[in-house]
Amino acid sequence: MRTSIATVSLSGSLTEKLTAASSAGFDGVEIFENDLLASPLTPEEIRARAADLGLTIDLYQPMRDIEAVPPQEFERNLRRAEHKFRLMNRLGTDTVLVCSSVSPLAADDDALAAEQLHRLAALAQEHGVRVAYEALAWGRHVSTYDHAWRIVEAAGHPALGTCLDSFHILARGSDPKGIEDIPGEKIFFLQLADAPLMAMDVLQWSRHYRCFPGQGGLDVTGLVRHVINAGYTGPLSLEVFNDVFRQADAGPTAVDAQRSLVLLQEAAGIAAPPASVEPTGVAFAELTTPDAGAVSDLLGALGLRRTARHRSKPVELWQAGAARVLVTTDPVRHRDGLALAALGLESPDPAAAAARAESLLAPVLPRRRAPEDAPLDAVAAPDGVEIFFCATDREGLPNWREDFAPLPEAPLPDAPLPAGRCGEPGPAAPLRIDHLALTQPWHQFDEAALFHRTVLGLRPQESVDVADPYGLLRSRAVTNGDGSVRIALGIGAGPADDAGRAQHIALATDDVVAAARAFRKAGGRALPVPPNYYDDLAARFEFAPGEAETYRELGILYDRDEHGVFRHFYTETVGRVFFELVQRDGGYRGYGAQNAPVRLAAQHALRPGRR
Amino acid sequence: MRTSIATVSLSGSLTEKLTAASSAGFDGVEIFENDLLASPLTPEEIRARAADLGLTIDLYQPMRDIEAVPPQEFERNLRRAEHKFRLMNRLGTDTVLVCSSVSPLAADDDALAAEQLHRLAALAQEHGVRVAYEALAWGRHVSTYDHAWRIVEAAGHPALGTCLDSFHILARGSDPKGIEDIPGEKIFFLQLADAPLMAMDVLQWSRHYRCFPGQGGLDVTGLVRHVINAGYTGPLSLEVFNDVFRQADAGPTAVDAQRSLVLLQEAAGIAAPPASVEPTGVAFAELTTPDAGAVSDLLGALGLRRTARHRSKPVELWQAGAARVLVTTDPVRHRDGLALAALGLESPDPAAAAARAESLLAPVLPRRRAPEDAPLDAVAAPDGVEIFFCATDREGLPNWREDFAPLPEAPLPDAPLPAGRCGEPGPAAPLRIDHLALTQPWHQFDEAALFHRTVLGLRPQESVDVADPYGLLRSRAVTNGDGSVRIALGIGAGPADDAGRAQHIALATDDVVAAARAFRKAGGRALPVPPNYYDDLAARFEFAPGEAETYRELGILYDRDEHGVFRHFYTETVGRVFFELVQRDGGYRGYGAQNAPVRLAAQHALRPGRR
């Protein structure tokens, strides 16, 4: 189906909004009146700009407080409406949204509303315009879609139809099934928005917290099915009022919006983009650094070993078991110091995963970074991290490991643990990457969750608040089915918050105590954990003799859920990156969120200038 | 009464919180457990630090999910509690907060709750500790203060009392009158928080939106009166969970917090700080600039004239009627270019106004900026603007005008309008300062409103949202009784938002059309208003022939309320400052908020790099 977006959903000037909508692949726009009023362009210029960008203008909106008013007031309203119909002719759009009245002048009189809407529609028709009447959830007398439709039906004018808005319908708890009783040709327009489920005043909820379908808790898909069943053939159009989107760059918001409509059509069975391909593991994490010294020391102390070197580029492969970390030395990327630049995900079908991503508007990266490299399918995540779809060591598929030449198997001088074969873990060395924690751009937390779910095929878990000393952070994990891919998406307290820039790699071990000892022995600096934390642990849990003392000595944190136990420690931070070594026992499912405030306070305490 | 604050109310590390509480004049603190856990200081060190800062530790909090649980669970809880009692001894605090249980293990059994709380209190007593039991508004079985008190009464242990929390009581809509039935000595603690009235889940409301008394919509004062009547003699203690305060600097937040308690005590009749003195007019606005060229051109084009010069400093007085603008050339303050640095408010009693401000912890500025100046009482507002309490040309009081030497009365070459006496308005020249619009630091919007109300004696009006193309702004006016002082406090969409840094001065005229013509003739650059705005005006209002065309030609904006009509135009922006010329007719009360989105879009369009 055709896709459209209301200009009020995007940030910026009207021309910025039109450009963003076009770039994201929308077919049309709704022009929000205030955007037009504030634009220096004439209606004719806006029409031409939209046409140049391949956009139709599907709706002009809104007209308010038109119907069921005293005669004199209604004459004024008709006069006002006629001005707007002329404007719409200049703009080249033929449908206007009329919202049910909120005016104290409006009477609770359906017959009067119908009669006046009939007159409005007659005037509209003279100007070649159609009127789409919509029930606002907080309309004074008309607040449900079926009520609005009864009035439209009673008015009985060919230029009068109804506009359905998923927010107004679902926020009121109306049953959308009745939509199928409306003739499709009388549904002049369909506006879509989702919203998180919140117990709050519906007007505030609507004006500040709407989001794109799939980002909230409303069953927008179900509603769309009913509208399609009714025979609606107009565009799917997004109208989202959101305080964050108003501030965010229009370009990414528009892409996010268009992606939500692809997904909505997939869910509603209207369209079939390539199916999602769930990743089966983490192939590698790639760090970039202007100088590999500090990170090499850190990886060595963690029990990883340098096992291979890229054949043509300054990239080294560090490994322990299935935990693989690429370290790329790139003197140009010095702003952040060490940063996580890319992530390799094992995919049963890398090409299909990339096709899925492309159909969902993920930025697809060139398949080869250099002519001699194995061709790899990759896309950019919203936080800029490059996601590679990998088939490590699988026959018949491009294998990124072939770009690397093995290094001699002799243990490195700084290797902390006796290891078996090169790349095999020593007794406490990392087994695999347990999870990654990646902070997202401030405006794009919901977008990031949607991207990871729909593009990468991961499953979002509950969102949790974490108290940092300098503000509240939010975190939400996305995982694959067997937990072999776990990414905790985080967001800082504010745009300028530096805690919001951290990235961390958690490595799994089956003996965190031995690993912590080895790490220290190899000269690694663990994050210091305050003694008060251990006093509290002793109050909360009963430990075997000496157990709590070991944790205290080694800076190991402890958590327990209904399934099992989680023990973990953190390294110092280098650039934007720090590591965690974790041991999960008995099926513990979380990430130690209980301990995050202590970890964050300790990290702040290490920053220069903090007490 | 003694004042206290929970460490969770302030941002930062525990030591930062203690320091801020002490500097703001608090007598004590509640130690929030997570702040202690995350601190590198031992309990003894925290105790010593607090003592050094003159703070007592009034409460340790919270203990959760203690009571009405199965026996085995309760034994574990006692074990945990004993750990905490020992910790409290080390910390030097004797009262612990126990919140009513939210655990699914808790039974709806008051007798069991009383019995277990009795045992807890007995154990506490052995350690010299008292237990203050509080009903959480979302407690599983105990959610009202009277229910919690019945259980405390039934338990009948001297080391067990109740803790009252204004949020939990008022958010549930409980009648606080019943507090007077509780013996004062059994009210072990009183926690205070306000909150804006919002229809939302009470837990979310409590965790994210609490604010200081007087900043929200709850009758905290009335509750405190009942608690005092009951005979409570402990501290007034603030416990505020607020997402913004978590991010804001602890120092100003603590001052704001302490000010709220002074005001609360004033309102409850417990304390009598010097009375508030309502200002009676705007004496002057003072601009600073590294180079007076551009602002001089602008003021001249607006019809103000340079009438006097400071006797010893590079300050010039520009004037038209009662509109007085000081321009200080200060090459050091070049970061912002032109900025509004100070505001003179006419005060019936400047010394009393300053005494009021000082009692409310406003930063008092030195009375003389130079030895030869008239002594002026002044304080700093939260946005850094200096507020001078003035008695312009009033006998027996220091007169700031005496610091200025009049300039010859000859009209300046660039004066746009024939004027009468020097400083008298020409036919369309400004009559007075109509209002000022000052953007506030991002974290301090509520603080700013409280400051202007309580320190300056102004009256807050409704808060309004204004759509900027790049985010939603908030604006709230504060005025004196006759409208001769009007300040619109604004806040940007985010911390990094540059629209959030603008300051503007609105000058009143009784002929805005003539003023706009004169301004243009004198070479002034008015903000261009898009033609679409005027098409819409013509649709909304019926004008006399030619009227709308005049507005369009001159960039005049138009608004109407139930009282009258408002016409206004804006100048270009210089540095952080722009001017507005306004004409109010028929008692119009607003500020043209309806037109603000158009104005903001036009201002953005003029910035480099914007289309």
Image (cartoon, coloured by chain):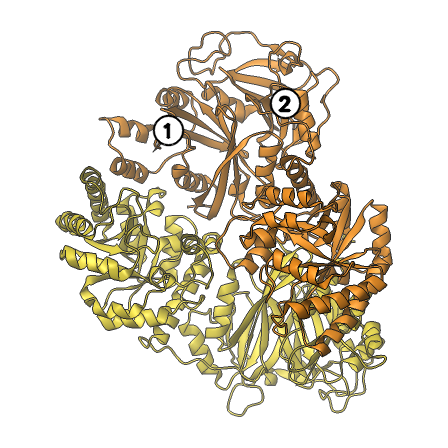
Chain colours: A orange, B yellow
SS for dot 2: strand
Q: Are marks 1 and 2 on the same chain?
A: yes
Name the residue rendered at 53%, 83% in the picture.
B481
The amino acid at mark 2 is Phe
As measured in the structure, the alpha-carbon distance from the residue carrying label 1 to the one carrying label 2 is 30 Å
Q: Which residue is mark 1?
A: A566
The x and y percentages for residue B11 are 43, 52
Q: Nearer the viewer, residue B603 or A79?
A: A79
* Circle number at residue B320: none
The amino acid at mark 1 is Phe
Residue B105: image quadrant is top left
Q: Earlier in the sequence, mark 1 or mark 2?
A: 2
Instruction: Mark 1: give few (<14), some (14-19) or many (20+) Cα within 10 Å.
Output: many
Name the chain under label 1: A
The x and y percentages for residue A91 are 83, 57
SS for dot 1: strand
Residue B294: image quadrant is bottom right
Name the residue rendered at 43%, 50% in the picture.
B12
The x and y percentages for residue A297 are 50, 22
Instruction: Mark 2: give few (<14), some (14-19) or many (20+) Cα within 10 Å.
Output: many
In this rendering, is residue B474 above or below A306?
below
Say whether residue A312 is left or right of residue B556: left
Locate the N terminus of chain A and report the quarter of the image it occupies.
top right
In this rendering, is residue A77 above or below B562?
above
* Circle number at residue A389: 2
